């Protein structure tokens, strides 16, 4: 399981890469994609959608289940990674490049976990 | 036996004490005394089999069953090959209504898979579901599956079946879609109105082809208008007509739906019927209801499974695309057997017979002063004006054991919607003409 140093994480297994104070990319962690198994479909938000901290803004579908992806910040979707719509397997192959959406105008954030804290959190979850 | 008794005395006692009362009488204490049944049900004593038969036959005899029918308007009398009933009555296939468990029976799943495949071939679409309750439900579900956050308007032709319109209205009211009725002009959908009013928020355009009045719509043009506005194009079709008319796919439809009753289901006083739904592969994840797929098992043997269930009501209820997506498994089986028995050629012959008999009848009616008001082409239904009061026409036909066309109402009062199928012999048509000449 890979955890990158330059990102922050959530307890619902999203990673967040801040470009500046109010702009961030959001994706699913390596641990999440491993647990979900092979992903066959992804539903992304639409550009211009407003997101709310802790609320579902996308979902991913594996062969037998659909799982919600939660947005860890309150803001506006300024860009979505359309590549994923045609190739959801990219989330499995390169989870930390397969960002879901770029959120701008961020007004509120979740309490994030540092890479170390996230690693610790996952270890506990796996026990 | 325990599992057949829903609540034991101890269960009841615990439940009553949990809500703080002592007895069942207290629970129903709110009800007025006179609505309670005090002395049990007043049922007559048992009857012998012969007595029951006699009684039931007596009730059935109160129905008027017409040997000759010239009425359609959404429910059609067609020839049903004997093999349909024969296969359907096999008790192994007479399963409970909707099969829920994916692994319950490979036979049932295969029969649904075959049905889906035939619906795809019939409509030209990529994928079909295991069916829904009826054609009106299929139409409304199709409209609902086009809705997204930015597209919330639905345009529906005024020339669709009135009950389909009512069902779509109910759905739109429920899910917050704005419904615009495209008026009819000369008995078909008014293209100019659609062109002027369609916009970027339009989720879909729904038409019926042939429409409620039997006329063929300018289906390709309507599809182009929908496409130009980036809206989905839904066509409701009579499946028999697809034996001679272009498929929804050829008209550029994204979704094809319809009432499957003409495909091997008897009229049966209006039900149970079956709604079929088919769509392009881009929309497969929005298609509600069960979808059976074909796969191979661990040993490489063919197997059938319920697939793409992830957005279904029994998996993610709150995000399910539909909550009435039970299918009509036995009716789907009937459709599958009917289509296999008829084959492509049989279906084509049926469609040609329907169409040519309707056109023969229309000509004969015109000749005796019942002008046809369909401006363009029609399939097996058409509308005439009646020179004498419609009631008089109908009762004259009834006396001869003939159910006449459907008397239209509202703005179309005084008009009759006639239908011919392969079941109407030329002699019957000539008899109708003879009677109407005398009225």
Image (spheres, coloured by chain):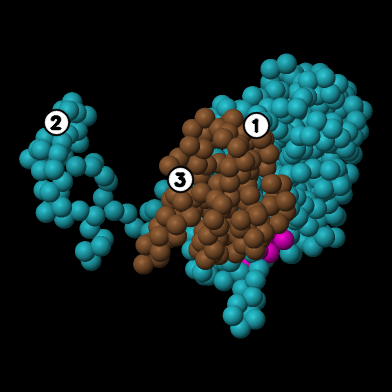
Chain colours: A brown, B cyan
Instruction: Find the magenta span and give its range.
Output: B109-117
Find residue A124 and report its horizontal and vertical position in percent.
Answer: 37, 62
Residue under numbered circle 2:
B29
Side of B302 where B32 appears, left or right: left
Chain for numbered disc 1: A
The residue shown at (86%, 21%) is B192
Choose mark 2 or mark 3, whichever is in front. 3
Q: Which of these two is toward me, A61 or B434? A: A61
Secondary element type, mark 2: loop
Mark 3 neighbour class, 10 Å CA radius: few under 14, some 14 to 19, many 20 or more: some
Residue under numbered circle 3:
A112
Give the alpha-carbon distance from disc 1 to disc 2, as whole Å: 56 Å
Find residue B408 and report its horizontal and vertical position in percent.
Answer: 71, 24
Give the alpha-carbon distance from disc 3 to disc 1, as whole Å: 24 Å
Residue under numbered circle 1:
A48
- Would you say the residues marked 2 and 3 are in contact, meaning their CB atoms lie under 8 Å apart? no
The residue shown at (58%, 46%) is A17
Split into 4 quadrants, where in the image is the C terminus of chain B?
Answer: top right
Of marks 3 and 1, which one's residue comes earlier in the chain?
A: 1
Choose mark 3 or mark 1, whichever is in front. 3
Secondary element type, mark 3: loop
**Quarter of the rendering containing residue B206:** top right
User: Which residue is at the far left?
Assistant: B22
Is circle 2 on the same chain as circle 3? no
**Quarter of the rendering containing residue A20:** top right
Is circle 3 on the same chain as circle 1? yes
The residue shown at (47%, 43%) is B318
Side of B195 where B305 appears, left or right: left
């Amino acid at each position: 399981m890979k955890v990158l140093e330059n990102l922050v994480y959530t307890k619902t297994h999203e990673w967040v890469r801040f470009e500046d104070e109010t702009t961030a990319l959001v994706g699913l962690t390596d641990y999440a994609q491993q647990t979900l198994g092979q992903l066959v479909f992804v539903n992304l938000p639409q550009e211009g959608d407003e997101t709310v901290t802790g609320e579902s803004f996308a979902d991913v579908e594996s062969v037998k289940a659909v799982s919600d992806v939660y947005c860890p910040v309150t803001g506006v979707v300024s860009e979505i990674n359309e590549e994923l719509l045609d190739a959801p397997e990219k989330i499995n192959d390169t989870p930390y490049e397969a960002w879901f959406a770029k959120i701008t105008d961020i007004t509120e954030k979740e309490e994030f976990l540092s890479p170390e804290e996230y690693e610790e959190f996952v270890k506990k979850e796996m026990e | 036996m325990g599992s057949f008794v829903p609540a034991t005395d101890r269960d009841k006692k615990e439940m009553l004490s949990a809500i703080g009362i002592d007895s069942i009488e207290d629970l129903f204490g709110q009800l007025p005394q006179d609505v309670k049944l005090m002395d049990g049900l007043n049922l007559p004593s048992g009857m012998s089999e012969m007595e029951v038969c006699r009684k039931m036959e007596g009730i059935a005899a109160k129905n008027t069953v017409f040997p000759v029918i010239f009425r359609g308007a959404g429910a059609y009398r067609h020839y049903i090959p004997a093999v349909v009933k024969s296969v359907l009555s096999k008790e192994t296939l007479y399963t409970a209504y909707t099969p829920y468990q994916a692994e319950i029976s490979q036979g049932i799943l295969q029969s649904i898979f075959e049905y889906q495949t035939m619906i795809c071939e019939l409509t030209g679409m990529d994928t079909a579901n295991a069916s829904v309750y009826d054609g009106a439900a299929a139409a409304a579900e199709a409209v609902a599956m086009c809705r997204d956050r930015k597209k919330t308007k639905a345009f529906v032709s005024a020339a669709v079946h009135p009950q389909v319109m009512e069902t779509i209205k109910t759905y739109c009211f429920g899910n917050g879609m704005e419904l615009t009725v495209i008026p009819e002009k000369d008995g078909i959908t008014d293209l100019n109105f659609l062109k002027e009013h369609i916009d970027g928020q339009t989720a879909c355009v729904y038409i019926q082809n042939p429409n409620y009045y039997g006329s063929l719509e300018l289906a390709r043009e309507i599809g182009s208008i929908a496409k130009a506005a980036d809206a989905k194009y839904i066509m409701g079709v009579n499946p028999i007509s697809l034996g001679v008319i272009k498929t929804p796919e050829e008209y550029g439809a994204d979704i094809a739906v319809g009432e499957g009753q003409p495909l091997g289901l008897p009229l049966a006083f209006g039900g149970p019927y079956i709604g079929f739904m088919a769509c392009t592969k881009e929309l497969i994840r929005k298609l509600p209801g069960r979808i059976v797929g074909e796969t191979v098992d661990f040993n490489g043997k063919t197997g059938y499974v319920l697939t793409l269930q992830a957005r279904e009501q029994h998996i993610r209820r709150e995000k399910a695309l539909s909550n009435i997506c039970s299918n009509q498994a036995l009716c789907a089986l009937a459709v599958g057997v009917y289509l296999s028995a008829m084959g492509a050629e049989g279906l084509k012959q049926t469609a040609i017979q329907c169409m040519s008999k309707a056109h023969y009848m229309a000509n004969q009616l015109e000749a005796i002063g019942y002008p046809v008001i369909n401006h363009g082409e029609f399939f097996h239904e058409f509308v005439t004006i009646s020179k004498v009061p419609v009631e008089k026409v109908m009762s004259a036909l009834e006396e001869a054991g003939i159910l006449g066309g459907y008397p239209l109402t509202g703005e179309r009062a005084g008009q009759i919607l006639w239908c011919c199928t392969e079941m109407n012999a030329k002699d019957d048509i000539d008899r109708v003409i003879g009677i109407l000449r005398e009225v």
